Image (cartoon, rainbow, N blue to C red):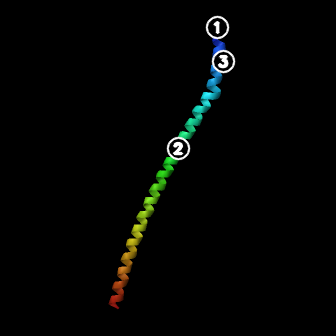
Amino acid sequence: MGDIITLVGPLLFLIIFIILPLIFIIRYFKRMEKRAEERLKLERDHAAFQQEQVKVNEEINQRLTSIEKMLKEVE
């Protein structure tokens, strides 16, 4: 019985002070990685949206230019 207690003590120490912190650290880094991936996805979506807005603005500018040309021709 005494041998079991002497074996359990260091094992508990190992679990409490080494393994549990490692588990929490690993979980923390996984969460950070997940957040970074989500942030990257949002940035990609935002960049795609900005490119779409640039295309729309260019199209509007083209239309406006053509309307201005037509108005100058009418005058």
**Residue, disc 3:** 9
Q: CA distance from mark 1 to mark 3?
A: 13 Å
1 or 3: tag closer to the N-terminus: 1
> Of label 1 and label 2, which has the lower sequence position?
1
Report the amino acid beneath label 2. Answer: Glu
Earlier residue among tags 3 and 2: 3
Within the image, what quadrant is residue 64 found in? bottom left
Sort mark 1 into few (<14), some (14-19) or many (20+) by Cα contacts within 10 Å.
few
Q: Position of residue 37 (x, y in %)?
A: 49, 47
Q: Nearer the viewer, residue 17 or 63?
A: 17
Residue carrying label 1: 1
Q: Residue at x 67, y 9 (%)?
A: 2
Give the residue at the far top of this rendering: 1
Tell me which amino acid carries mark 1: Met
- Other residues around mark 3 within 10 Å, as few (<14) / some (14–19) / many (≥20): few
The front one of 9 and 74 is 9
Could you say which disc has been placed on residue 33 in the image? 2
Task: Determine which quarter of the picture holds residue 1.
Answer: top right
Left or right position of 26 against 75: right
**Residues at marks 1 and 2, CA–CA distance in whole angstroms:** 46 Å
> What kind of residue is marked 3?
Gly
Of helix, strand and loop, which one carries label 1? Answer: loop
Number of marks in the rendered image? 3
Q: Are marks 1 and 2 in contact (CB under 8 Å)?
A: no
Q: Quadrant of residue 50?
A: bottom left
Question: Residue drawn at (35%, 80%), measured in percent from left and top?
Answer: 66
What is the x, y in percent for residue 14? Answer: 63, 24
Helix, strand or loop for disc 2: helix
Q: Is residue 41 left or right of residue 13?
A: left
Report the residue at 43% width, 63% height from top: 51
The extreme bottom residue here reads: 75
